């Protein structure tokens, strides 16, 4: 069992518990997500904790929600689809580019052994780190910076997830993917992108289209 917190309660009279379980059943399971570990993680992670208070009544709707700084928390179905495409194992080491609210980070931490997450916006990174630590997650490492450069000293990674749209797949991230590992990334310009799973086969890469999607752009530091 991975060392994540394993989320909130799944029993009781709290209407938020019922809403969360209903979200997983209606919005995720019925739309084709079958990985039991992904479904269980989404049942445990309390999405309402990761959205601003004035949007908490919408936390278990299948929609993206604003989290400040021009960023958003992805819709639950997209979180599920991306997580399933990573093909995580309990021992997986995962790089996440774009911590955002920390919701996707928590879902990953419920399944995999170690998460390395990078966020370029300090205000989001600090808030997400404080929340995730307060919830008891101990298998997450945090960094503020340009996630398109990855985390070279911790590479290679069994899985890499980018939660913003890249005009092109960043080569440093491909280089940090382990043999046989899965890389999930939205590619393309606004407003919509193609979501791909990329698998490394030695020095070649297999690319598989997953679905159309809509993400904020991946902002990279300019080279000097």
Image: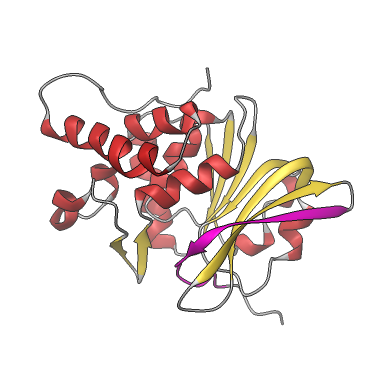
Q: Residue furthest right?
A: 203
Based on the picture, tell me whether residue 20 belongs to the magenta stretch.
no
Residue at x-position 47% and y-position 26% = 36
Residue 130 picture quarter: top left
Residue at point 46% right, 30% down?
110
Image coordinates for residue 9, horizontal then vertical, percent:
25, 22
Query: Is 5 placed above or below 82 here?
Result: above
Q: Nearer the viewer, residue 78 or 101?
A: 78
Q: Is residue 87 left or right of residue 224?
A: left
Q: Is residue 30 above or below residue 218?
A: above
Q: Quadrant of residue 147?
A: bottom right
Q: Which residues are magenta?
A: 204-219
Query: Which quarter of the figure is the C terminus placed in?
Result: bottom right
78 with respect to 141 (left or right)? left
User: In percent of the image, x 13 and y 57: which residue is there?
Assistant: 54
Which residue is at the far bottom? 224
Describe the colour scheme in one phrase: secondary structure
Residue 212 in the magenta stretch? The answer is: yes
Relative to 42, say whether 97 is above or below.
below
Q: Is residue 127 above or below residue 106?
A: below
In this orientation, does residue 46 appear? no
Name the chief secondary structure element in magenta.
strand
Q: Position of residue 148 (x, y in %)?
A: 64, 63
Identify which residue is drawn at 38% across, 58% down: 124
Q: Position of residue 201 (x, y in %)?
A: 84, 46
Q: Is residue 21 left or right of residue 209?
A: left
């Amino acid at each position: 069992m991975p060392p994540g917190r394993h989320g909130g309660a799944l029993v009781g009279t709290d209407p938020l518990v019922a809403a969360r379980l209903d979200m997983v059943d209606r919005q995720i399971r019925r739309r084709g997500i079958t990985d039991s570990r992904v479904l269980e993680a989404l049942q445990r992670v309390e999405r309402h904790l990761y959205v601003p208070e004035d949007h908490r009544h919408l936390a278990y709707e299948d929609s993206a929600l604003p989290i400040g700084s021009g960023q958003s928390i992805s819709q639950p179905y997209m979180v599920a689809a991306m997580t399933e495409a990573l093909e995580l194992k309990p021992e997986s080491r995962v790089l996440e580019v774009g911590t955002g609210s920390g919701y996707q980070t928590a879902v990953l931490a419920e399944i995999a052994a170690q998460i390395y997450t990078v966020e370029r916006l300090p205000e989001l990174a600090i808030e997400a780190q404080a929340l995730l630590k307060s919830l008891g997650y101990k298998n997450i490492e945090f960094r503020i910076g340009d996630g398109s450069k990855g985390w070279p000293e911790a590479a290679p990674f069994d899985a890499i997830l980018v939660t913003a749209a890249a005009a092109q797949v960043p080569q440093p991230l491909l280089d940090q993917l382990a043999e046989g590992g899965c890389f999930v990334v939205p590619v393309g310009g606004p407003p919509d992108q193609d979501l791909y799973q990329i698998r490394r086969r030695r020095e070649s890469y297999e690319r598989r289209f997953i679905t159309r999607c809509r993400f904020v752009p991946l902002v990279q530091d300019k080279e000097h």
